[in-house]
Image: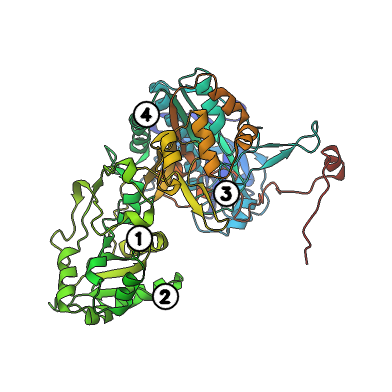
Amino acid sequence: MHRYRSHKCGELRDIHIGETVRLSGWCHVVRDLGGVLFIDLRDHYGITQVVADATSPAYRHAEKLRSEWVVRIEGKVRRRPEGTDNPELETGTVEVYVNEIEVLGPAAELPMPVAGEQEYPEDIRLKYRFLDLRREKLHQNIMTRGAIVDSMRKRMKEQGFFEFQTPILTASSPEGARDFLVPSRIHPGKFYALPQAPQQYKQLLMMSGFDRYFQIAPCFRDEDPRADRLPGEFYQLDVEMSFVEQDDVFAAMEPVVTGVFEEFAKGKPVTKGWPQISYSASIRAFGSDKPDLRNPLLIHDVTNVFRGSGFGLFARGIASNENVRIWAIPAPSAGSRAFCDRMDSWAKGEGQPGLGYVFWRDGDVSGAGPIAKNLGADLTAILMKELNGRNGQFVRLPVPVEEQTTIDTLFAENFPLQVAKPYRDMRPDGLLDGDAVFFVMGTPKDIYKFAGAVRGKIGEEMNLIDKDRFELAWIIDFPMFEYNEEEKRIDFSHNPFSMPQGGLGALINRDPLRIPAFQYDIVCNGYEIASGGIRNHKPETMVKAFEIAGYGEKDVVERFGGMYRAFQYGAPPHGGMAAGVDRIVMLLCGTTNLREISLFPMNQQAVDLLMGAPSDVAIKQLRELHIRLNLPDKS
């Protein structure tokens, strides 16, 4: 028999009754019932109940055992007494009557419990992560993560992609976040950077004649941490393809992502035939470029209703600026002053001056509230009739490139939200008695995020969001550039390596802020889970795009010399994307915190409490790297 185990702790069944077995694992729970000891012995594979009574030669050893001691036991498998089966365990019909116990690793007093899933302070959980990882839910999440990565890899290879590994030490480049820098000992004063993404390398692979690349790539960004993005590092399914247009990327990747979700969704519905929603339509309809399509509410433009109306605040705002809009968010079944006042208080807590509303009750179509009183019965009745909560699957808006414009001027009153097919109707004939509607006023670029937050808050408060499904969509036609208010200059809005729609001609002849890019995201349930684009593979177009963003040709050559040179020697049209492994796992595991699906994460201050990183280093190491510290004044 093997030194430590003949079976794993999740293997024993009725067919093993009467056999002598050897198990090793952790004492999950120890129960002393007075003369009889029950030990739930746990390993990676499951739990087996072990029993020792006063007649057992191992009883005196069993009395010393405590939670999380590592032991080897030997004993005979027997049927559990009638009425004591545990249907929650795969081994729940049998137990092992132990005759020998060996302590392999005693445990000190635990700083946190392992058995059970009770909440515990995060700093303790991260400092003792090796204990935290023994807990059932987190342990299972990590195993699910591994299975999801395996599924991704398998599906990518079935689609004809080849796996490559790109360098970890590379050159610093402006890709939207701060680099982690690595000083070079051999080249004093120079630095490597950890890659924010394998962007340039995967494009260089296309230049090198490889056709379909992927890898499960580690990426490093020196960003402030938040719940849906771990500080320091993350992993992505990185993809690139040659000789493709945007629809080819969609056709290759949609089945991969859909398949992974279906495999791990535990029966929850997953979108088939994803809608393609333009960035502008998404902002306009949902107040977000990563909309939660489980929420059936739409944002409506009701500017014309208030233009010249008796509600002076809105009427004056519209008259003062042609770009000012009044956006309305319906709230089915929310027609009470108490709810409306609660929403108003919430808005003030979000830093807003308040939240206007109208609600209908007691069959009065003229509505209730200050806005209704000043708007008048006729216009309020029009609001009630025309507003509805109908959602739909949005297709790409057929707006010619030369007619696309900035977010402020795009949203005219008759902006054509094009619905392919409604899939969840609520109030198809307008608002009803007992409903409410809330309003925000301003230019679209200033109000869209708050309008989206109102839509989400109503959806949550009124329990409108179907949380037992995964709604996936493509968000397309992102703007190529945006105006950086802090630095008072034009900057890339997304990926600087994307191809502008209209190519070099658009960069030369059009307002940069009105140029869309062949840039796209995948969104799921309110999260961006992937981003990609068709690449700018023409050197003159690349230089012009970076010139608009404030970089000269010399800067392009210095920062992206390898790729710029490669473009001179026959560059194929190519494109790809990167899907966030961490966020996909987070969604499929049903959590909203990436620390629940990662092995050894840092805390919110970007500190690894387990390993003590970041840490001081010896003066000798700094000298070898030719580095002198210039620390900020602690006072």
Q: Which residue, given by chain and number where applicable, does mark 2 sit on?
A: 353
Percent coordinates x, y for residue 537 in the rendering: 48, 28
Tag 1 secondary structure: helix
The residue closer to the viewer here, 207 or 390, is 207
If you read the primary sequence from the N terminus, does the residue marked by circle 3 or circle 1 appear first?
Answer: 3
Q: Which residue, given by chain and number where applicable, does mark 3 sit on?
A: 132
Tell me how far mark 1 sits from mark 4, CA to CA. Answer: 34 Å
Q: Are discs 3 and 1 less than 8 Å apart at CB?
A: no
Label 1: few (<14), some or many (≥20) within 10 Å? many
Tell me how far mark 2 sits from mark 1, CA to CA. Answer: 19 Å
Q: Which residue, given by chain and number where applicable, does mark 1 sit on?
A: 456
If you read the primary sequence from the N terminus, does the residue marked by circle 3 or circle 2 appear first?
Answer: 3
Tag 2 secondary structure: loop
Tag 3 secondary structure: helix
Tell me how far mark 3 sits from mark 2, CA to CA. Answer: 44 Å
Percent coordinates x, y for residue 113 in the rendering: 57, 54
Tell me how far mark 4 sits from mark 3, CA to CA. Answer: 46 Å
Numbered label attached to residue 130: none
Q: Are discs 2 and 4 less than 8 Å apart at CB?
A: no
Percent coordinates x, y for residue 197 in the rendering: 55, 36
Q: Is residue 333 left or right of residue 446?
A: left
If you read the primary sequence from the N terminus, does the residue marked by circle 4 or circle 3 appear first?
Answer: 3
Tell me the kind of residue under disc 2: Pro
Numbered label attached to residue 245: 4
Q: Are discs 3 and 2 less than 8 Å apart at CB?
A: no
If you read the primary sequence from the N terminus, does the residue marked by circle 2 or circle 4 appear first?
Answer: 4
Tell me the kind of residue under disc 1: Gly
